[in-house]
Amino acid sequence: MTAELKIELLRWQRAQRLQALGNEAVAKALARPDAHVLLTDEGKAVKESTIAKQIKFRARRAGVALHDDPTLCSPPRISRSS
């Protein structure tokens, strides 16, 4: 794990803990030993398809995914590109 990724994961963990203070569903989900990293406001795991849509949206907005082939900007492709 890179130092940058570790910093961001710790930042995300702090943000989730703060969210859990005012959201019982998230607090309950985080208390589980198998808690997911990405949670919805209802304390459920974020679906892979939602993550893919968010990545594609942000890539288009950043001018990265202006290709005819939408698979050029998919979560598996991005994870292998680093």
Image: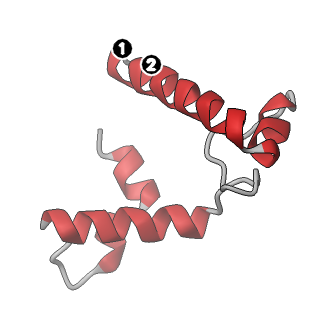
- Image position, residue 20 (x, y; %): 70, 36
Q: Quadrant of residue 70?
A: bottom left
> What's the residue at 36%, 73% (across, down)?
71
Location of the N terminus (image quadrant) = top left
Task: Please give the name of the residue rendered at 20% of the width and 69% of the height, measured from the top-left corner.
Answer: 61
Left or right of 78 on screen, residue 65: left
Q: Is residue 12 left or right of residue 24?
A: left
**Label 1: how many Cα within 10 Å (few below 14, some 14–19, many 20+):** few
Q: Nearer the viewer, residue 29 or 52?
A: 29
> From the viewer's perspective, is 75 left or right of 57?
right
**Which colour style is shown?**
secondary structure
Which mark, by number, is residue 35? none
The residue positioned 47% from the left and 66% from the top of the image is 52
Place residue 35 in its image quadrant.
Answer: top right
Tell me, for residue 6, which label it has, or none. Answer: 2
Image vertical order of residue 12 relative to residue 52, above or below = above
Q: Residue furthest bottom?
A: 68
The reply to whether residue 60 is visible in this rendering is yes
Per the image, the residue denoted by label 1 is 3
Residue drawn at x 66%, y 56% is 40
The percent position of residue 65, horizontal first and vertical second, equals 21, 71
Does 62 appear above or below 10?
below
- Looking at the picture, which amino acid does disc 2 mark? Lys
Q: Amino acid at mark 1?
A: Ala
Tell me the element at label 2: helix
Q: Nearer the viewer, residue 53 or 72?
A: 53
Taking depth in this image into account, of 78 and 43 the one nearest to the observer is: 43
Q: Are marks 2 and 1 in contact (CB under 8 Å)?
A: yes
Q: Secondary structure at mark 1?
A: helix
Q: Calculate the distance from the C-alpha at mark 2 to the C-alpha at mark 1.
A: 5 Å
